[in-house]
Each structure stands twice: as structure tokens, then as C-alpha cells.
Amino acid sequence: MDTIKVKDGFLGQKMVVLPESIKKDFHQNKICSSFFVTDLGFYPNAHNHYRTRKKGAKELIFIYCIEGNGDMIVGKSKLKITPNSYHIIPKNEPHEYRSDTNNPWSIYWMHFNGKATEQLYQRYLEQRNTDGSVSYESHRIELFNKIFNMYKSEYTVPKLEFANILALQFISSFIYSSKEIAAESTLHTNLINSIIDFLNDNLDKTFKADEIAEQFKCSPSYLFNLFKKRTGYSIIHFFNLKKIQKACEYLKYTELSIKQISYKIGIQDPLYFSRTFKKHFGFSPKDYRKEQRD
């Protein structure tokens, strides 16, 4: 039996609980079926807030404390809830939580479900700090309020789809908030962007992967793995794709011959250029030009 104790609610509290019919629709909705919110709310200065679920909940539960303290027991783990910390309780896991008597918490919370939520929970376990701490960012509260107002106002399918997309963004902003991820992402993004700019500026040339790695003072293996992870292609494959894309531009907007275009993208063998172009587009350069101008 679930137990909930409050003292006549909390001044300023707000919450929305979706009816079962809408929850069922989410499971069938191709956009929402991977992730959707079923309940959400905000409990400020929540005196005497206490909840226990001996069999757990059917959804995952997200709790973000912005002030005050509380305690949480999930399975056999006991947690102290502090300001600027968040926690996710998995489905069907016995748990209980309570607001501190002397310094009651203020919490934002969501119940969510969907096909991708188990993987999302695993990423949460991998990335979270031990105490669940995160830096305070006002945009998260603004985003929560936007989601809440959309859930509260109407239940049209497009609006609920959009609200769930924003809710996934909201929770992801916590899960992927570690400084290590942010720093690594920025560093890697800058490096890859610099390489892409370099390749685009040198489409008339040819390079080996080792030469590009040397240019950016990286080991070839490190750069290969990083570049493929970020773009889906090896550097040379990506470089060749950019050459072919540039060739399309020449074919469509200039009167340059096939041979001239081949030379301008750094391919000295026009026959090889034609074969490569057809491999990517299914047309020869000549037929592509004709197709674009008919």
C-alpha cells in the first residue's frame, strides 16, 4: 500500500496528473513512445511531505531539490537530499522519501516512462555525482515551467508531443551536466570543427590521414576514432564526400568541364572522379548536370 502524508498541501504547490487514457495514447505515439511524462509538479517549502511505495512506481521518478533538505531510501540505499541535487528512482523499486522537519525541501518532480527510459536511467547511473549535486541553472526552471504550462493548458497531440520533447531535454540537462562531459564535448567539438574547416578550405588538395593528424598535432588513431565518433565517417571518407559535394556545386552552377571540375577538387584522374561520383549519387557527373538543368 502506498502512503502519502502532507499537511493540507503546500502553499504555492502545483501539479498535473495525466489521465490514464492519455498515458495509453503515449505508448502508441511514435514520437512520444520512447519518452513521456505522466505526472509533474512543484512542492515549495514542503512541510511534512512524506511518500512511501512498498512496490515502487510504474514510472521512473525524477526529483530535483532546490532548497531545504530531505531523506530518501531507494531499495537498500539511503540518501541525504540537499539543495541543488537531483535523483531518479527506477521503476518498480521500493522507496520512500520525506522532507526534513526543520528545513523542509522545495522540489520539482516528474514521473516519466517510455521505451528509452531504462537506457536513460543507466546513463544517469554512469554520469551522476555520488550526492546527485548539480550547478543551479535558471534556464532549467524556465524550461520546467514551460513544460508544466503546456501540460496544464490543453491536451492536443502536437502540443503534448512538443512538451515531451522538452521534458526529455529538461531531464537530459541534468544527466549530461557533468563538467567532464561539458569540457570534453567543447574540446572535441572545437577540434572537429577546425578539421572540417581545414578540409573545406583545401578541397583542391589531397591528404593522407597521417598528414591531417600531424597538422593538428594528434595521434592518427586518436583522431580517427574521435572524428568517426563525431561525424560517422573516417576523415578521408568525409573529405571525399566534401569533394563530391563541391563537384555538385560546380556541375550545377558553372560551365566547367568534367575534367576541370575533377582537377579543382584535387582528383587528377577524371575517370576515377566519374566513378567515385556515380558511386555516391547513382549518376555520372554528366547525367547529374543534365538532371539539374532539365
Image (cartoon, rainbow, N blue to C red):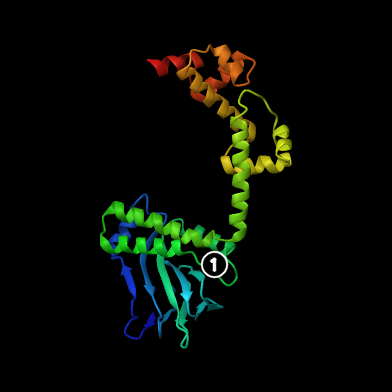
Does residue 244 appear to the left or right of 48 in the view shown?
right
Residue 245 x/y as whole percent: 52, 26
Q: Is residue 247 left or right of residue 291?
A: right
Query: Looking at the image, which is closer to me, 237 or 140?
Result: 140
Kindly identify which residue carries mark 1.
134
Residue 8, by quadrant, is bottom left
x and y, in percent, of residue 141 in the image: 42, 65
Camera-nearest residue between 31 and 93:
31
Quadrant in the picture for the C terminus = top left
Say which amino acid is labelled 1: Val
- 10 Å crowding of disc 1: few (<14), some (14-19), many (20+): some
Q: Whole-percent x and y of residue 40?
A: 37, 68
In the rendered view, tell whether residue 29 sits above or below residue 78: above
Q: Dividing the picture into quarters, in which one does residue 144 lie?
A: bottom left
Return the x and y of residue 283 as percentages of the image width and height: 48, 19
> Residue at the location (49% across, 22% down)?
249
Q: Quadrant of the N terminus?
A: bottom left
Q: Is residue 29 visible?
A: yes
Q: Is residue 36 above or below residue 6?
A: above
192 vs 160, left or right, is right
Image quadrant of residue 192? top right
Judging from the image, what secondary structure is the residue with disc 1 in? loop
- Outermost residue on the bottom side: it is 102
Residue 58 appears in the figure = no
The mark total stands at 1
Q: Residue at x 67, y 25 (%)?
A: 206
Against 6, residue 156 (above or below) is above
At a point 62% along the width and 23% down the height, the residue shown is 204
Q: Is residue 145 above or below residue 207?
A: below
